[in-house]
Amino acid sequence: MTDDEREQHVAALRGLLYLACPDSPAIAITVTAEAIAQHTEEVTGTPVPQAAHLNELKRPSIVDPLNLVDADLAGATLAHVDLAYANLKGASLRAADLTGADLTRADLTGADLTGAHLRSAHLRYARLPRLDLSGADLSGADLSGADLSGVTLSGADLTGANLSEGFLEGASLAGADVTDADLTDARLSGARLEHTIGVRLPAGATWDLDTRWPADLALLAAEVSVELRPGVYLLPSDDARDRSGTARP
C-alpha cells in the first residue's frame, strides 16, 4: 500500500468511526483509524485494541442527532451515508466524498466543504448559511428549503439541482451553472445572478431591488412581477418562467 493509499484508507476509516461513535474524542478516532489501517497491513484478522469501545452504530434522528461539531472528516468517504439531522457545525469536510449522502436538515453552519463532492446529495432543509461552496459539484442535489443565505456558489455546478423554496438571500452565483435547476418559490432577495449560466425566471420566487438578474432577464422580471411590498417582488406563475429565455454569461 502506498502512502497516498494509506492516507485515503485512514481518512475513510476516520469518517466511519465518527459516524459510529460521535461522542468519542477526536484523538481517539484518529488513533483508532491509524491502528486499524496498520493492523490491516501487518496482521490480517488480528483484533485492534484501540477499537474495543468503538463498535456501536447510532442511527441519526431528529430526537437523537449525530453530534459531529468541529469533527475532522477531511477526505472521508461518506458517499450515501445517512447524516440526516446531524450537527456538523464547524466540521471539516474538506475533499470529503458526500456523493448521494443524506444530509436532510443537517446543520452545516461554519463547516468547511472546500473540495467536497456533493453530487446528488440530499440537503433538504439543511443549514449552510454563508458557506464558501465555490466550484462545488452539486449537480442533481436536493437543496429544497435549504438555508443558503449569503452562500458563495461561484462556479458551482448546480445543473439539475432542486433549489425550490430555498433561502438564497444574498447568495453569489457568479459563473454557477443552474441549467435545468428548479428555483420555484426560492427567496432571491439580494442574490447575485447576473453572471449565472442557465437562469430562467422561477415561478413563485421573491426578489428585491438588490437582486441582480442577467441582463436579458432584468426587464422581463420587472415586467411580469407583482410588488408584494415596497421594493419586494413576486414572480407569480409558470407563465413568467415559460416566457423567459435561457441566460448566458
Image (cartoon, grey):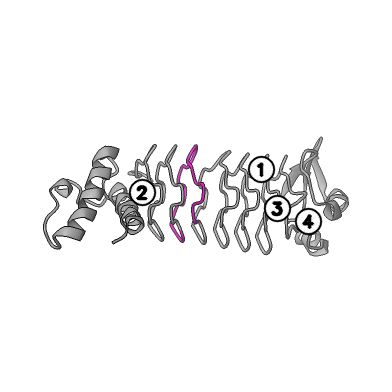
Do the CB atoms of the residues marked 2 and 1 lie less than 8 Å apart?
Answer: no
Residue 102 highlighted magenta (yes or no): yes
Three-letter code, disc 4: Pro
Q: Secondary structure at mark 4?
A: loop
Which residue corresponds to mark 4?
A: 249
Where is mark 3, residue-wise?
175
User: What is the C-alpha distance between the residues marked 3 and 2?
Assistant: 36 Å
Answer with mark 1 or mark 4, whichever residue precedes in sequence.
1
Q: Position of residue 214 (x, y in %)?
A: 80, 52
Residue neighbourhood size for the residue with mark 3, other residues' Cα within 10 Å, grouped as few (<14), some (14–19), many (≥20): many
* Crowd class of label 2 (few under 14; some 14 to 19; many from 20; radius 10 Å): few
| Magenta residues, dominant SS class | loop
Q: CA distance from mark 1 to mark 4?
A: 17 Å
Q: Which residue is mark 2?
A: 61
- The residue mark sitting in front, 3 or 2, is 3
Q: Residue at 81%, 37% (x, y): give it.
A: 231
Mark 2 or mark 1: which comes first in sequence? 2
